Amino acid sequence: MKKSATLLLTILISIFIVSSAQAAFVPISDLPDGQLVIGDKLFSDFEVSGISQGGPPEPSTATVKVDVIDEALLGEDEYGLIFRLAASAGADQLINANINFKVSILPDYSPWLIEDATIMLSNAGATDAGLVTVTEMIYPGPLPMNPLATLNTKSEWDDGGVNLYDSSVLNSQVKEMWVRMGIIVRGGYSSDTGTANLTEIWVIYGQVPEPTTILLLGLGALALLRKRRV
């Protein structure tokens, strides 16, 4: 059963500080075979690109670290990743990064389909003219096409943190999908002073059984019920 957005957000806020401290983050460049497996999902085809201006390190697979989130934290049928950027921008500084990857249902879990997506920014903040924005575009194929979902998060001065979280049901349930994240951490420019920082990005994907699997389970339960009545 899927959690409401409010409940999931409450759970995430309550656990991300503890779990982040215990997480085993690894640079994307050091992943075995460039892959991560958690639960029924395979995360692969990682790419990191981007630019930096004014001094911050340029984003790459060596500077961006990753760890998995399992259902022990989130509940049944939900898995995801934590990307650690530790990005910080002061006056006249900018970090503009792209993180791309593929999410697949493993063959042993073929009756399942990916149903929804959630994104949350951890330890994100901005002062004055500083800004943090993260957009997640999810596609049914490796090339941009009509997206299955678009999620948007941001942090800017005095916004109260109301935009650090977004969640969406996919337009259609799929066994594999391609994720494209665009990230901007920007300090103030010229006379507009300000700072911006972003430590982690949480991405979570839930799944459900295929309709045929649900039907078979229902028929099995009906047959058992009839047997008991005989």
Image (cartoon, rainbow, N blue to C red):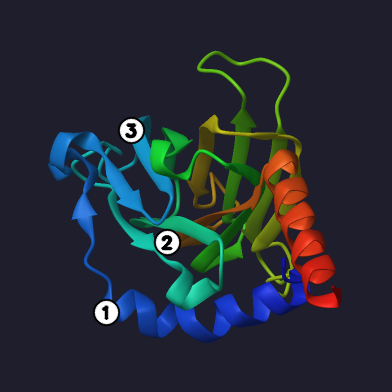
Tell me the amino acid under the disc marked 2: Glu
Q: Which mark is residue 22?
A: 1
Helix, strand, or loop for circle 1? helix
- Left or right: 95 in relation to 119: left
Residue nearest the observer in this picture, 51 or 79: 79
Q: Are marks 1 and 2 in contact (CB under 8 Å)?
A: no
Residue at (69% x, 45% y) in the render? 151
Say few, some or many: other residues with alpha carbon within 10 Å of mark 3 (under 14 / 14 to 19 / 20 or more): some
Q: Whole-Å distance between the Cαs marked 2 and 3?
A: 17 Å
Residue 166, given in percent of the width and then of the height, sits at 70, 57
Left or right placement of residue 19 versus residue 176 in this view: left
- Identify the disc placed on residue 200: 2
* Foreground disc of the pair 1, 2: 1
Vertical position of residue 42 compared to residue 47: above or below: below
Q: Position of residue 2 (x, y in %)?
A: 72, 66
Q: Quadrant of the N terminus?
A: bottom right
Residue drawn where x is 16% and y is 34% of the image: 33
Task: Please determine whether, in this image, residue 21 is positioned above or below residue 117.
Answer: below
**Real-space CA distance between mark 3 and mark 1, rounded to the nearest whole angstrom:** 23 Å
Depicted 34 relative to depicted 220: above or below: above
Residue 115 - label: none
Q: Can you name the residue that lies furthest to the front here?
A: 230
**Separation of residues labelled 1 and 2 (CA atoms):** 14 Å
Residue 43 falls in which quadrant of the image? top left
User: Where does the C terminus fall, quadrant-wise?
Assistant: bottom right
